[in-house]
Amino acid sequence: MAETFVIAQGGGPTAVINQTVVGAVLEARKLYPNARVLGALHGIRGVRDGHLIPLSELTEEELRAIAATPSASLGSTRDKPDEAYCAAVLKSLQNIGADAFIYVGGNDTAGTQGILSAASGGRIACIHAPKTIDNDLVENDHTPGFISAAEFVAGAFLSVDLDFHALPGIYVGIVMGRHAGFLTASSVAWRMDPESAPHLFYVPERAFSRARFIDDVKACLARHGRCVIAMSEGVSGEDGRSLVETIVPPDRLERDQHGNVKLSGTDLGRAIEQMLAEDLPGKRARVDTFGYLPRGSIMTVNPVDAREAFDAGAFAVRVAEQGSASVALQWDGEKTVFRAVPLEAVAGKTRHMPESFLEPDQNRISAEGIRYFERLVPRRFTVAKPFV
Amino acid sequence: MAETFVIAQGGGPTAVINQTVVGAVLEARKLYPNARVLGALHGIRGVRDGHLIPLSELTEEELRAIAATPSASLGSTRDKPDEAYCAAVLKSLQNIGADAFIYVGGNDTAGTQGILSAASGGRIACIHAPKTIDNDLVENDHTPGFISAAEFVAGAFLSVDLDFHALPGIYVGIVMGRHAGFLTASSVAWRMDPESAPHLFYVPERAFSRARFIDDVKACLARHGRCVIAMSEGVSGEDGRSLVETIVPPDRLERDQHGNVKLSGTDLGRAIEQMLAEDLPGKRARVDTFGYLPRGSIMTVNPVDAREAFDAGAFAVRVAEQGSASVALQWDGEKTVFRAVPLEAVAGKTRHMPESFLEPDQNRISAEGIRYFERLVPRRFTVAKPFV
């Protein structure tokens, strides 16, 4: 029976990642009256270095306050551990006497857990609890953190659409998303009607062509008098390289430890602004980069997302008795259900937006895509259609 | 006794500008049972061209739905009317039999009302109802639309600060504001404590120097391990020219009808990102451009702002009997009070952030400034201080 848990948070924060930590602590306390739950600071780095907080000594009130706070209160990390790093982490977990290590993160995190689980010979349950605003984990219908971020994006595009009714022009909102367009596409969720914004969607799943983009914008302006566009930071050209990579001079391109190019929304935004100025001169155009704003916004902590994130942490504690696993949120046709799936089913894999979420040969979301986003991100506000 | 009102919306939309229109309609209906209230589409252009909506024929339910909707439902305009334009507008108002024309907007709008009032020989009451997220109208303690936009900015910086606790680095959020730094400075309102973000503020009221900026960031990183910065689009160098103007090639510089250079947050953002990459190489840095997101956000419609905007419209109708005026929101030490002030007191003037709102020789908000923003934008959320 597991009684010492270590928990850590990895990768980009979300609005509800603390819920998962607190869900785990409260569940451990419920199941094992003498359970110790230690929170590691800055992900596995904190495990390796022994920077640990005794979360199980906090009161429920203190824990609930942490749960309601966006971003990772324990700190996070982008470290990609090599063999020696993993060995040091494992040694530290053994010294602590950990029965289970719960790591909240994305597919890189699941990969780390797979390595640790194998290295421990199965003696420490290594549980991956899902978290990502990118919504790009396989085996999952959606991931904790996504709905809150999507609500920010949906609300922003509804608001901008109202703005561009009043003062028409071209608007491009650039949204995080390296390989998966879910967050960008979620902007469809709060449209007033099918004629409302965003009118066009550019996601990593579809090759970007400048000529096609300009034609799309022209047609949109002709039809609606305005054109509001949702674009992912990770949009890529026909050659598969991200636009940012083709725009930024090689000496300024930064890469993280995972080898990913740093996607600068600002570089992309400026390039798009320049394309519009050159190819559609005289048209009022504005590009904004949402960047970090959606991912941990205190203004859009969605209650369903918060509850699911909490439940994912609690579920992680319950499945730890059966050994290592990844927690997955699946959809049974009526509700979200939690399942334990093998770590290797999730590790290192990216779930892209299904082809069927996009209209064939068009930069628009299909009826199937709209149903998905409207289910996950129900509209929270009623608005009156403008007179103009 | 005035019985025919024309109302229009000018300049950039806000989250609550429709409240002012609906406040005027409902007050007119209350005071004058047979009042006609006509809404002009796209500001005075709609008056000139006779594009008018009979708002007084709508039900209270329909009007309340419009009031709750951000942005200008009647449409707005950036037109700067010349003499002939004003004459055409006046003729149209006379043809309609207008007793009063209420124009909701900023200081340019007050200027237009001054011209129309003089041209009509005082026979049509020309009322300016205030609206601007820039908060830059003289005679006003604050302006309708500002509080909601400020709440977006305050919430965004609180959220980003939590994010940068988890994954430290440098963050710059670029916020609208051409001549006045109020909106940028409002990011101070929801700080967790004096050590929290934003750590540095760059506003149009203080000359920007690259060397000083880099020194500030270095000192901030040394002290806090992270550096979160709020910067106005309108920051200007020692020579008084906006940074955007010095960055963008002259052939790409766009100007509006008021002669203002189009401030591209994206151009500024990229320049700042480049400065940081050059002068602080290897430091994780990210720049986001908030752009249009704060100004009409459906996520941060502040109830006090909404009520004051509504009351400003109602007040405009009441003062119309006494002739032309600008409606001003003043602070009596305990509450906001409405006053009618002469149009020429407001027209064409810009209220800057008082020098006393900034610390002498520092890019920080003073205690007096903090008191002002905390009064206007009370914190709506409680958060737990991160462990890191």
Image (cartoon, coloured by chain):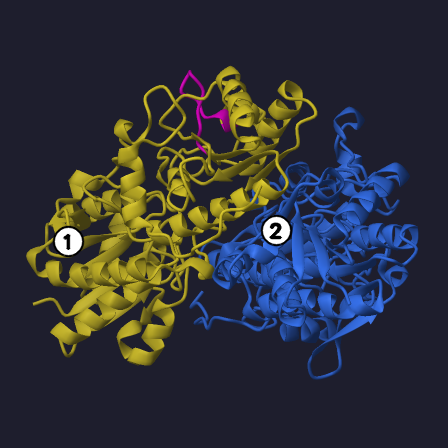
Chain colours: A yellow, B blue
Q: Are marks 2 and 1 on the same chain?
A: no
Query: Measured from the top left, where is residue B210 in percent x and y?
Result: 76, 46
Q: Quadrant of residue B143?
A: bottom right
Q: Quadrant of residue B312?
A: bottom right
Q: Which residue is mark 1?
A: A337
What is the chain letter for disc 1? Answer: A
Q: Is residue A81 left or right of residue A113?
A: right
Location of residue A379 with respect to B338 vertically, above or below: above
- Which mark is drawn over residue B44? none
Query: Measured from the top left, where is residue A79 in percent x and y?
Result: 38, 46
Furthest residue toward front: B34
Q: Which residue is mark 2?
A: B54
Looking at the picture, tell me which residue is in the foreground, A280 or A288.
A280
Please give the name of the residue rendered at 21% of the width and 44% of the height, measured from the top-left corner. A140
Q: What's under tag 2, amino acid-wise?
A: Pro
Q: Quadrant of residue B134?
A: bottom right
Q: Is B15 covered by the magenta stretch?
A: no
The stretch in magenta equals: A233-244
What is the chain letter for disc 2? Answer: B
Looking at the picture, tell me which residue is in the foreground, B132 or B109.
B109
Q: What's under tag 1, amino acid-wise?
A: Val
Q: Residues within 10 Å of mark 2 (few under 14, many from 20)?
A: few
Q: Is A243 covered by the magenta stretch?
A: yes
Q: Quadrant of the N terminus of chain B?
A: bottom right
Spatial CA distance of label 2 from label 1 is: 52 Å
Q: Main secondary structure of the magenta part?
A: loop
